[in-house]
Amino acid sequence: MNKVKEFVRRAGAVTLAAIMVLSSTGCAGKGEQQEKGGTDTKVQSSEPITLRILENDTAKSLGYLDELLKAFNEKYADQGITAVDANMEEYSNLAENGPYGYGPDVIYQANDKLMTYAADKHIMALDVASYECCSKLPSTAVDAFKINVDGKDYYCGIPINVQEPMLFYRADLMPENWENDWDDNKNGVADFFENWNDLYAYSLYLREHDTSANKDSKYGLVASLNDLYMMAEFIFSYGGYVFGTGADGALDAKDIGFGKGDSALGMMELRQFAGLMSEECIDDSVKTGRYSKVADGTYFCSISTPDTYKLFFERLEKVYEGEGKSSEEAAKLAEENLMMIELPR
């Protein structure tokens, strides 16, 4: 568990550092001057500058947005620059809000969303050459944020850490007979953690043995169907991939492999899983409900990223406290039983 916590801490730290890079982008307006030296951009202004930062809801609930803002404001206090929470929902529509001055000054978002706004000129370009981090990133990653406007190339974002989706579950809710009934190869790992077919079989078993009046208390895997990032392993398990490799062994950004191999079978399998999931799987509502529903046992497992470990942990603590455990006992049980593992193959 210590390794899990350290991984979560580091993932958050990388995100913070990356957003601070974005936050320090010079926004020189009328009456302002920018002085560039090395990798820093110093802004000298006769008027105070306030940057409104839009981060995702996870950052807010875990508190590291506050850490980011505090660190940024301490660093730039002598330059008249202050960063504040944009106080906007993470799914804000920048196409409607941005051009009218209601959008954030800095947004943390994946390139597939970000570049949509860049194409419609709702966000500013960045001088990526001035950031030391870009020289350490592969050109294919940086070029994901490149856009050509009127014959000139611009960069409207900087790639940051990529977290691998993980499977979260409660160890104390494993079936009592799993060593005999769900470990055919006798390797000490439940088959439903090793391959999708057995996870489907166990999800079906839970649905068929749901004794609640509304048949809505026991599910196997439940996750967001329209989140390709979270569900890409269904494609990868059947031969799909993101980028292929060239003759030199380097990634080939022109070779997009989401439709390669038997990836269609993976998507068919995902569609079959949908028939066993709760209706929350059809949109993003499952992303907020998965923490409490894995904790209370409604979902046997769900998919999320390591930075959300604490959210699962806090919900599980509350479940144990609701069962009469002290706060110390609840924390100990949550640490013992909350598991985060790689997805099946």
Image: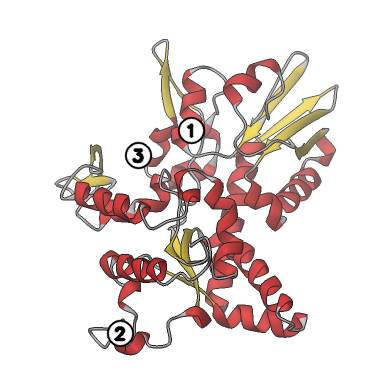
Q: Are the two marked residues, 1 and 3, in contact with CB atoms closer than 8 angstroms?
A: no
Query: Residue 324 location in percent, x, y?
Result: 74, 82
Above or below: residue 252 compared with residue 298 = above
Give the residue number, with chain letter if any, for mark 2.
Answer: 181
Q: How is the image coloured?
A: secondary structure
Please identify the residue farthest to the front as the structure is shown.
213
Query: Residue 33 location in percent, x, y?
Result: 73, 21
Question: How far apart are the two marked residues, 2 and 3, measured between alpha carbons?
Answer: 46 Å
Please identify the residue farthest to the top as the structure is shown.
150
Between discs 2 and 3, the one toward the N terminus: 3
In terms of image quadrants, where is residue 295? Answer: bottom right
The kind of residue on which mark 1 rests is Lys
The kind of residue on which mark 2 rests is Asp
Please name whichever residue, 309 or 284, is drawn nearer the observer in this view of the structure: 284
In terms of image quadrants, where is residue 91? Answer: top right
Residue 123 at least partly seen? no
Q: Secondary structure at mark 3?
A: helix
Query: Residue 342 location in percent, x, y?
Result: 39, 67
Residue at 25%, 58% in the rendered image? 237
The kind of residue on which mark 3 rests is Thr
Between discs 1 and 2, the one toward the N terminus: 1
Give the residue number, with chain letter if any, for mark 3.
Answer: 140
Give the residue number, with chain letter if any, for mark 1.
Answer: 113
Is 240 displayed left or right of 72 in the figure? Answer: left
Is 5 displayed left or right of 242 in the figure? Answer: right
Between discs 1 and 3, the one toward the N terminus: 1
Question: How far apart are the two marked residues, 1 and 2, measured between alpha carbons?
Answer: 44 Å
Please name whichever residue, 131 or 208, is drawn nearer the observer in this view of the structure: 208
